[in-house]
């Protein structure tokens, strides 16, 4: 990937992490530039995700800011190597917006994804009939076809030996708010049962009577990025795109919320029984 194609999600994550380390060490941009024997603009470009950093410079930087943890160093080195990686959607053009590309980058780099949904079915668990109902309300027929193709391509990440683990907590109204005819509803509910048979997929339903504090909860993803150890980040979805949270305090908050949600939700077995009963009643 050429420097002109940057910043990317990976290069921005790398730059943000290097900036955090610099600030925590109490250093200025000029201090890092002096240690790496380069100009300040280069350091600014690295921190803004507009260019990468050479392995030797990265080692010098670690020594400068006092990072000794070899596992952590290797995780950052791994990210630094990947910033030039070209994914299958890199050449898709303007049909895919930047927010979706950013999220797909996080998705493909994950070994575990946890998601909470309170309004729509998680995208990786949607049938074609369901996703078309979602897309048709927002986009042109041409864009709809493209989005269906892309979503099917994303769902392939749940297949094979290299599949990541996927855990979903679905608020129960989502199961009762499936638009379309009876066949769309039945197909989607049956699809949930089929997906739950995969060893790396876990589905829990959050009942109306769930014992949870009266707080507003937004749809979100916790993505564990591959590494030793994995690095957790949070993605918040909204109508016009998404927001990435990487600050430790933010991530810790959503990890705590996830524990509350899974504890309050039905067990995986109870959840599937609920879906089966719903199919019978439909």
Image (cartoon, rainbow, N blue to C red):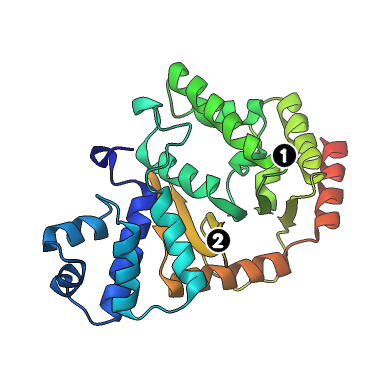
Disc 2 is placed on an element classified as loop
- Residue 160's label in the rendered image is 1
Depth order, front residue of 149/165: 165
Image quadrant containing the C terminus: top right
Residue 170: image x %, image y %?
67, 52
Residue appearing at x 66%, y 36% in the figure: 178
Image vertical order of residue 231 relative to residue 110, above or below: below
- Is residue 117 shown to the viewer in this render? no
Q: Which mark is residue 86?
A: none
Mark 1 closeness class: few <14, some 14–19, many ≥20 residues within 10 Å:
few
- Tell me residue 152's x, y (percent): 60, 30
Q: CA distance from mark 2 to mark 1?
A: 20 Å
Residue 227 circle label: 2
Q: Nearer the viewer, residue 111 or 274?
A: 111
Q: Quadrant of residue 16?
A: bottom left
Q: State whether residue 221 is above or below residue 253.
A: above
Say which residue appears at 71% left-offset and 27% top-offset: 184
Is residue 255 shown to the viewer in this render? yes
Mark 2 surroundings within 10 Å by alpha-carbon count, few (fewer than 14), some (14 through 19), many (20 or more): some
Where residue 167 appears, as percent x and y from the top left, is: 68, 54
Q: Is residue 70 left or right of residue 214?
A: left
User: Closer to the N terminus: mark 2 or mark 1?
Assistant: 1
Badge 1 marks a residue whose secondary structure is loop
The location of residue 272, given as percent across then percent down, is 83, 49
């Amino acid at each position: 990937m050429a420097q002109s194609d940057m910043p990317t999600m990976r290069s921005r994550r790398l730059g943000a992490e290097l900036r955090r380390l610099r600030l925590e060490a109490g250093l200025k941009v000029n201090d890092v530039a002096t240690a790496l024997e380069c100009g300040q603009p280069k350091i600014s470009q690295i921190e803004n995700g507009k260019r990468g950093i050479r392995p030797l410079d990265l080692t010098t930087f670690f020594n400068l800011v006092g990072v000794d943890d070899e596992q952590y160093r290797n995780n950052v080195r791994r990210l630094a190597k990947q910033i030039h990686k070209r994914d299958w959607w890199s050449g898709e053009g303007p049909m895919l917006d930047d927010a979706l590309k950013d999220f797909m980058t996080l998705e493909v780099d994950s070994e575990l994804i946890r998601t909470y949904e309170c309004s729509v079915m998680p995208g990786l668990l949607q049938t074609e009939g369901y996703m078309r109902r979602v897309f048709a309300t927002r986009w042109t027929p041409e864009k709809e076809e493209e989005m269906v193709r892309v979503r099917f391509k994303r769902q392939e990440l749940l297949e094979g030996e290299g599949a990541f683990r996927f855990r979903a907590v679905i608020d129960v109204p989502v199961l009762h708010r499936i638009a379309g005819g009876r066949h769309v509803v039945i197909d989607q509910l049956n699809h949930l049962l089929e997906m739950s048979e995969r060893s790396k997929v876990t589905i829990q339903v959050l009942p109306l009577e769930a014992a949870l504090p009266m707080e507003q909860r937004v749809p979100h993803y916790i993505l564990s990025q591959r590494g030793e150890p994995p690095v957790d980040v949070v993605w918040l979805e909204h109508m016009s795109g998404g927001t990435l949270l990487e600050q430790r305090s933010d991530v810790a908050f959503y990890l705590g919320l996830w524990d509350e949600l899974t504890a309050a939700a039905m067990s995986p077995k109870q959840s599937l029984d609920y879906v089966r009963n719903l199919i019978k009643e439909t």
